[in-house]
Amino acid sequence: MTCLAWQANLTFLVDITQHLNDLNLKLPGKNQLVCQLANHISAFRTKLQLFRQQTASGNFVHFLTFQSHLQKSQDIGTKVYVAKLDTLAQSCNSWFRDFDQCRVLMKRFADPFSVSVDDLSAEYELELTDLQASDDLCANYRGNSFLDFYRTLPDTFANLKDNALVHTSMLGSTYYCEQAFSQMKLNKNNTHNQLTDDNLEAILRLSTSNIKPDISKHADDMQHHPSH
């Protein structure tokens, strides 16, 4: 391999790594549901198809480092880079095949007003038909988050609500695991060696909770010491 070819491979991998890093930053985001993670992954896999098509035609508009290198050496072929993208796409297909298997189920939860009734099992057909025919429920869905919409959904849509519980209970992000581990390392150290497990558990619970205590209310409810 010539020096120019080696440099070209290196700059191409730098750009690919940057795109992977962009995906990696989206996945651990806070308060994400599993269907939102699936959307990030689906978008990345679609981008890979776009990259392949453009690379095959010599278009490297999304590979800025590599494109800058090509300005110095225009005689580099594209087949090897198409092959690299094909390998990455095949790996993604293997890594995320579980998302493909439950894609319709996730869409039924994330966007029940656009999913086709024909794609669902019989237990959801009637409920989804009634749901999609309701202008009020559609307006409620458009104006609220997933969770708020399903909280207010009438009990007559029991199967759809159960499906929502399944998807909201899935671990959608590693954010809270990483946050808890960081807090544990911060608090359980040599200078805090007398910290008990019960106190550590309380600290981790508070540091990873979204609940904000009403300090003023708790202070007002406390019994003050009587004056002497």
Image (cartoon, grey):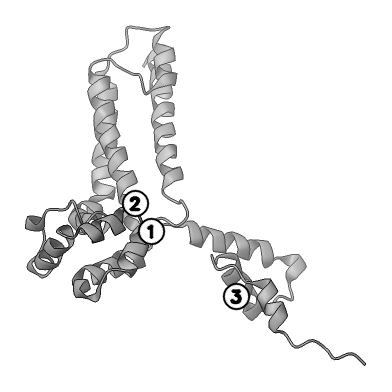
Q: Please indicate whether residue 19 sits to the left or right of residue 202 in the image.
A: left
| Residue matched to label 1 | 172
The answer to which of marks 1 and 2 sits earlier in the sequence is 2
The residue under the point 23% across, 44% down is 93
Identified by mark 2, the residue type is: Gln
Q: Nearer the viewer, mark 1 or mark 2?
A: 2
Identified by mark 1, the residue type is: Gly
Label 3 environment density (alpha carbons within 10 Å; few <14, some 14–19, many ≥20):
few
Q: Position of residue 118 (x, y in %)?
A: 6, 56
- Secondary structure, mark 1, is loop
| Residue matched to label 2 | 36
Discs 1, 2 touching: Cβ within 8 Å = yes
The residue under the point 55% across, 59% down is 179
| Residue matched to label 3 | 201
Q: Please indicate whether residue 221 sits to the left or right of residue 133 in the image.
A: right
Discs 3, 2 touching: Cβ within 8 Å = no
The answer to which of marks 3 and 2 sits earlier in the sequence is 2
Q: Position of residue 55 (x, y in %)?
A: 27, 21
Residue 52, relative to residue 159: is it above or below? above
The residue under the point 42% across, 57% down is 173
Label 2 environment density (alpha carbons within 10 Å; few <14, some 14–19, many ≥20):
some
The residue under the point 22% across, 54% down is 107
